[in-house]
Amino acid sequence: LPVLLRKLTVFVPSEPDRETITAATIVATSIVHRYGSQPVQVVVRPDSELQGAAPDGPLERSVVLAKNSDAGAELIYPLEQAPPRMYLTGTGSDLTDQARLITSDLSEIAVATSALAGPSAPKAQLAPESITLDDLGIGTVTGSGGATATASITIDQTRLGRSAANLSVHLIGSYTPGAGSVRATVNGSPLAVWEADDTGRLDRWIDIPNSALSRVETLDISVDHPPPTGSGGCSAAADTSVTVDGSTVVRSSDSSTPAPLGLRSMPQALMPQFEIALADESYAGVVRAVTMATGLQRLSSLPLVPEVVSMDQALDGSAPALVIAPASDLPDTVTLPLSSIDETTFRIADPDSAGGATELTVDTAQPFATVQVTSVQNNAVLVGSWNSAPDRFDAMLSWLDGDPDRWFALDGDIVFAAQNTEPISLSSAALSGADDTVAASDDTPDRTTVLVVGIGLAVLAVAGVGALVVALRTRRSTTEPSRHSDST
């Protein structure tokens, strides 16, 4: 592998099995993790195109996955001046063992052009309950300024190796002594304020509420030393500084179901290991699995560990999972924030609301696709689905994969995509509360409010309805929200 890599091509059989799909996701996510912030483009191609494929350039590499009774990893040069291709062969777990060789420490001693990797299934690494800023790779953080100084500590939950709850930070450090105040805020929201003193010593526990947790939290420690009255203005104010030492401890516990559960809880909610289930385990399924797995890996500081399993196993509640399937194929155990109960009606169920579901009826049927976050038996499940042909879903994945920043920008718990529009992020909590922002007509007994383009029509714009009139039905169900009908 070169120091700089622009493109990775993974050739897979046209009719892959689950171990081959697992190997493809392992290769792709391992390479993306290895190069970190370098935006490596990952392309999946069928092995039928291998013979006519052009040799790799200096900043490109290819990996060929093949089922073979003789397991192994071998470098083969298509041309003398071109980089070699890595051929990984085997059946069952032997193939996934070879896939893990590429970026493992064992590769450092594989000095020949061929090698055979033995069983090396990764063990789940349990995240420690307490870890220092030094161990997190953050180190000592210092801020300085005039009357106010701020030290910003960025806590990445993927570096913690899990979805965290009850997170608290034991601040150890110092600041410029004197009269004033010390403030702690997280993502701009105040947490605590206390008086500064003449010791200039930081030694205090700060608790971060679960409701404020996300994939990345920024904890700001600010010190304010206002200039004395009548001192002549800002020029008389001495410089202020604050230092948070690398020995500062971050303490957390495991959150079996992240709260809030949404796209910002990904991928840490899938750590340390997660399962992938595909309704379509064909070549097209490989592309979808690799694209979503690499997108999630781009969000993580630690390597993800995927494994392809059956749909029943993925949804048995024993582990977090990524599920890719038509909405009509999802079992009743999966309750999505956004579902369709017929060709024109969406049902929005806010998982944090006891008020039931909100229904949105549009006057036209449109093919759409979603990526949504839900939970099954207290395990996080990321679901990619579509309501008709998978074209919309594939187009949405291509759009996300076209710019890595798009994965970072996802928010809420729904990504919605329809024809002729770019995908957008939506929040089921905001959507299910739409009836609170619209005044119903006094002469409408069922509280059906007719809207034109304007308030709350982000969903309609995405659905390609444009200026068509819709009915927002705020009828609240008195029972549990329905899951999925067979006609979805």
Image: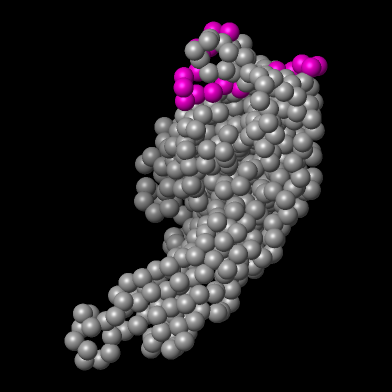
The residue sitting at 53% across, 9% down in the picture is 79
Coordinates of residue 377 in the picture (x, y in percent): 76, 53
On screen, residue 210 above or below 48: below
The residue sitting at 49% across, 12% down in the picture is 81
Q: Is residue 447 visible?
A: no
Left or right of 15, for residue 225: left
The residue sitting at the top extreme is: 52
Please provide the residue range marked out in magenta: 51-70
On screen, residue 7 above or below 227: above
On screen, residue 436 above or below 404: below
Left or right of 334, for residue 313: right
Q: Is residue 426 magenta?
A: no
The residue sitting at 59% across, 18% down in the picture is 85
Which quadrant of the view contains residue 188? Answer: bottom left
**What quarter of the picture does the N terminus occupy?**
top right
**Between residues 350 and 162, which one lies in front from this camera angle?**
162
Coordinates of residue 376 in the picture (x, y in percent): 73, 50
Q: Is residue 161 visible?
A: yes
Left or right of 372, for residue 223: left
The residue sitting at the bottom extreme is: 230
How many numbered circles does the render carry?
0
Left or right of 285, for residue 185: left
**Between residues 359 and 388, which one lies in front from this camera angle?**
388
**Between residues 365 and 392, which one lies in front from this camera angle?**
392
